[in-house]
Amino acid sequence: MTDSPLNAPLIPRNRVIHPVPCDPDYKTSVTRSPNLPLQSMDSTPTEETGPRFGHALIGPLDNNLILNWTKGAAPAIGERILVHGRVMDQLRRPVAGTLVEIWQANAGGRYRHVKDGYLAPLDPSFGGCGRTLTDDEGRYQFLTIRPGAYPWPNRVNDWRPMHIHFSVFGQSFGQRLITQMYFEGDPLIHRCPIAHTIKSRAQLDRLVAPLDMAHARPHDFLAYRFDIVLRGRRQTMFENRPEGM
Amino acid sequence: MVQKLDWLDETPSQTAGPYVHIGCIPTFAGLAGIYPEDLGLSPIADGAEGEIITITGAVFDGTGWAIRDAMLESWQPDAQGLFTGQPGTDPKVSGFARFAADGESGEFSLRTVKPGPVALPGGGRQAPHVALWIVARGINIGLATRIYFEDEDNSADPLLARIEQRHRVRTLLAKRTAPGQYRFDIHLQGDNETVFLDL
């Protein structure tokens, strides 16, 4: 499979499938969402190019959140899980060699961050971030622990469902995406104002990773599957024509 | 019924949340040692050709508060207007940087090389600019904008030309405050709301 050609325009983003920028149920979004319409235009070389990261960047434990904080000295506390999937574009082409970064709370629902003061204790054996490059077929995998749910300051009794944050680059800056993966069967998903900034139930369901017993390892870990789709490029024989034709 | 299309929707975005630093700039977040260093510390290496500049600013919410938890990414060409990956680029310019609003003041700072104008495949060119992508708690999908420069010729830039309300163009122009120093504030809402992009 070849890379998408440079200079082919990106398929315009369909904003309808994305969260609404301003949602009163997610209070912080009210003052942090633009009020005026976005200025739209076809993508340019600025959006059609992007940073690339090589294998030299990635350490051997970078995709193992159970071990990476202690460099293998002590495993993190929690339910061991494998999270894996494929990164592809809208035309189903694998996005190979792209950087995937994740971060998450520990098993008790606490982040290792100066601004997280939740009661649940830090796990001295868990940092909470990982990264990897996709392989030639766009596949990635992380070994981690199931993150805990936790309360957050929004309405009086709001709780985040178990989730893992994902950051993906793709091959061009215009494909840049940050999202969150949820877990099949978590009753908090449908009580979460952040999850419900996505107004289409079908689109929200695309962020819910199913339990994947075919990739679970007996007596070791369960597995969840999470595929990610980035913007594709328009590919017709009429692209790359001189302006005005 | 009609034939089915087989292409997919993009995966929906979700907010990066208040702890985006853990995943993207862990050393900044206090997780020093988990990686050798944070990604995108600088878009240039020593010896990059062109004028070295520093752009400082802050991201203001609709109440005028400089938000403390934003993370920004920048992407730009070298002084000749070429992006990494294109033939003939300056090997000292990666073009990519990550930086965060300061946790106390909200100020950010980007030290880079001033980009050159970018030739367009169909003819014409874009004025020198740095692409920005902004994420934070409360931002449900990353916000794209561009830093142009008030001391460059921006008259033929195709994107700036599309902005109907001409007084809003200035929201995309970095102000030169001293030799090599620029100021670029981002306003998420209000009278000076920055022009955000969908491209």
Image (tube, rainbow, N blue to C red):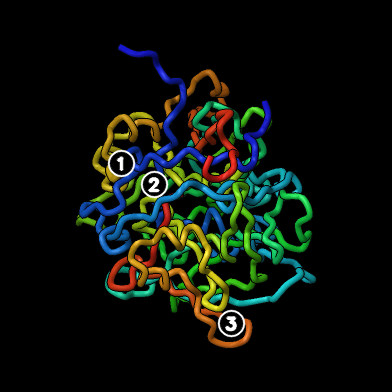
Q: Name the residue rendered at 78%, 59% in the picture.
A: B91
Q: Name the residue rendered at 62%, 47% in the picture.
A: B121
With A101 as the anchor, is A20 left or right in this view? left
Q: Are marks 1 and 3 on the same chain?
A: no
Subunit of mark 2?
B
Mark 2, other Cα within 10 Å: few <14 / some 14–19 / many ≥20: many
Secondary structure under tag 3 reads: strand
Q: Quadrant of residue B17?
A: bottom left
Q: Name the residue rendered at 48%, 46% in the picture.
A: A42
Dot 1 corresponds to which residue?
A198
Dot 2 corresponds to which residue?
B14
Secondary structure under tag 1 reads: loop
Q: Quadrant of residue B114?
A: bottom right
Picture coordinates of residue A226 (x, y %)? 48, 31
Picture coordinates of residue A48 (x, y %)? 58, 46
Q: Are marks 2 and 1 in contact (CB under 8 Å)?
A: yes
With B84 as the anchor, is A99 left or right in this view? left
Dot 3 corresponds to which residue?
B181
**Residue A113 badge:** none
Label 2, label 1: how far apart the Cα atoms are: 8 Å
Q: Are marks 1 and 3 in contact (CB under 8 Å)?
A: no
Q: Name the residue rendered at 36%, 45% in the picture.
A: A149
